[in-house]
Image (cartoon, rainbow, N blue to C red):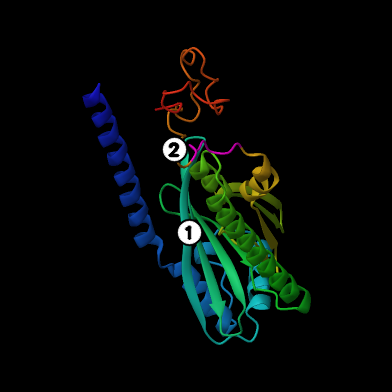
Amino acid sequence: MKKTYRLLALLFAAVLLVGLLASCDLVEEYAESEEVTTVMERVLSGERFYGGIFQGYPSGSVDAVWDELERIFEGASSYEVAFTAVKTSINNGKETLVAVYEVTADTDATAQFTLTYDETAKLIGFHVLDITPKTDAVTMIMKVVFILLSLASIAFSIWMIIDCAKRPIAKKALWIILILLSYAITVTVGEKLDFNSSLGIFLTFNTYVATASYTTVKIVIPFGTIVYFILRKRLKPANHTPNGTPPYGQPPYGQVPNGTPPYGQPPYGQVPNGTPPYGQPPYGQ
């Protein structure tokens, strides 16, 4: 059985290693994009072209792409390209690869280029999205509000961790782990509505991101902290033995005396009434 577990562990490690190596190869291969550079050079020079990557596309759709690029990068004289992501997928038995780049100009204008390739590395899709960050007053206020909410949430969680550490409750370590957990909800409103959720730790920040094409809101709910805050006064205390020792002749705390006291002696824990017969030692000696 142990050999089987070892083989499975080695197989899993091998698959993971192959996946990482393949991802590294893809990153190196698509880290630089001649297509993006060629298009941006033409945008800055004001010269459009309809061949190359746009070969086979209707002229109307190509003009729409150029119009959008010229609008985004109007007045720009230089730019920088950053490779941000790559992923592969298989649909109907055909493999496609999607590479994503961000282009930022000296005017702070930013665009996201999404290039799709088929299994022969031929470009079959070219999409441009304006992601220039908004800097209006509403956006700035919302960002400050979300930062303050994050700080308040973290402070609340730290307070509850300290409270839990001080309380004599059972299963304290498990409660501290629960306090650390939070639930994040991310909503993106743009060309389409996107909703995501994830489980994480309480240090995750609330975020508000607004661009020319979409707005993303991430709200982190410290549900573990909230649950502990509500239940903390009802939690079962940990078992503790009393400090000190019982009086001489008495059984340990929590135990019932065995048997009965000698004839004529009072019940355990009571002081004898009266005095012993003449010549007898005091009770208990």
Which residue type does callout 1 highlight?
Ala
Residue 111 left/right relative to 41: right
Visible in this render: residue 201? no
Judge from the rendering whether residue 20 lies leftward or rightward of residue 179; answer left or right. Answer: left
Where does the N terminus fall, quadrant-wise? top left
Instruction: Give the main secondary structure of the magenta stretch.
Output: loop
Residue 147 x/y as whole percent: 66, 69
**Which sits in the foreground, 201 or 166?**
166
Pick the front one: 55 or 8:
8
Within 10 angstroms of label 1, few (less than 14), some, or many (20 or more) residues?
some
| Residue indicated by mark 1 | 85
- What is the distance, in whole Å, between disc 1 and disc 2 at their CAs? 68 Å
Please give the name of the residue rendered at 50% of the width and 27% of the height, measured from the top-left corner.
Answer: 254
Indicate the position of residue 98 as horizontal and vertical percent values: 49, 54
Residue type indicated by callout 2: Thr
Name the residue: 37% across, 55% down: 26
Mark linked to residue 245? 2
Secondary structure beneath label 1 = strand
User: Quick one: label 1 or label 2, which is nearer the N terminus?
Assistant: 1
Residue at the (67%, 39%) spot, across then down: 234
Q: Which residues are magenta?
A: 236-242
